[in-house]
Structures are given as C-alpha cells and as structure tokens.
Image: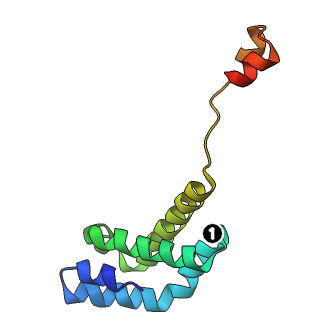
Amino acid sequence: MISAALAILETDEQRNELSEIYERNIKTFYSIAFSKLHNQHDVEDAIQEAFLAVARKPDLLFNIPASKRVSYINVIVRNISYKMWNKKHKIYENETELDEALNEQLSVEDIVIS
C-alpha cells in the first residue's frame, strides 16, 4: 500500500525505516483512521495519503527522535482522516450570528434568507 511513498524517498535507509514503521504499526494506523472514517477503502486511502505526505517531506520525520516518529505519523493519519470525513460530509461553519439577526427586527423569512 505504501509503495508509492517508498518510491519517492531518496535513500534506502529512509525506505527501510519507513517500511518498518508501517509494518510494525499498520494496525494502529488502521484503528486511528477507522475510528473516524468507518469505511475500509477510506481508511486505506487515508493511510496511503499520510505516508505520501511523509515521503514528500522526509526531513520532517527523520529529524525527530526515532521514539517519536510513530506518534508523528499517528497525528498525520488522524488529521487526514478528519479532513476526509469533513470533505465527505461537507461540514461548513455557519457564520450567521443569531443575536444580530434578532436585534435587527427582521422577519423570519429575511433571517432565513440571510
């Protein structure tokens, strides 16, 4: 699943380490993504996208201590899962202030339209 990410990396050392991290922690990554997405295909996409993000900027991962690298990838998987879920469900913030609308003495129709 992460072959595209491994192909981007420049050195065999980075490829081996990223592959090892993936193999040792795939269940954790899957669990993190599945807790938000609830769909196997979306989970696989989120994990692949996370590893592609790591491979595009490998210095960010390999400059942190080895003991914290898995946690770093966990956060990336979680954030990508949230973004995918929000995009799929089209979550938008409603910026209309109800207090402002009520203070203007508008009709219900005008409030809904605004």
Which percent across, then down, holds residue 22?
43, 86
| Residue under label 1 | 37
Instruction: Judge the density around disc 1: few (<14), some (14-19), many (≥20) Cα neighbours within 10 Å.
Output: many
Which percent across, then down, holds residue 28?
57, 82
Residue at horizontal 74 percent and vertical 19 percent from the top = 111
Q: How is the image coloured?
A: rainbow
Which percent across, then down, holds residue 81?
55, 65
Report the residue that reaches farthest toward the right: 108
Q: Is residue 98 visible?
A: no
Q: Closer to the camera, 49 or 74?
A: 49
Quick check: 74 left or right of 6? right
Q: Quadrant of the C terminus?
A: top right
Q: Closer to the camera, 98 or 11?
A: 98
Residue at horizontal 48 percent and vertical 91 percent from the top = 24
Quadrant hosting residue 57: bottom left
Report the residue that reaches farthest toward the left: 10
Quick check: 50 left or right of 114? left
Q: Quadrant of the N terminus?
A: bottom left
Q: Is residue 7 visible?
A: yes
Q: Closer to the camera, 4 or 78?
A: 4
Q: Closer to the camera, 114 or 79?
A: 114
Name the residue type under label 1: Leu
Which percent across, then down, holds residue 108?
81, 18
Q: How many marks?
A: 1
SS of the residue under disc 1: helix
Quick check: 7 left or right of 96? left
Residue 108 in the image: above or below residue 60:
above
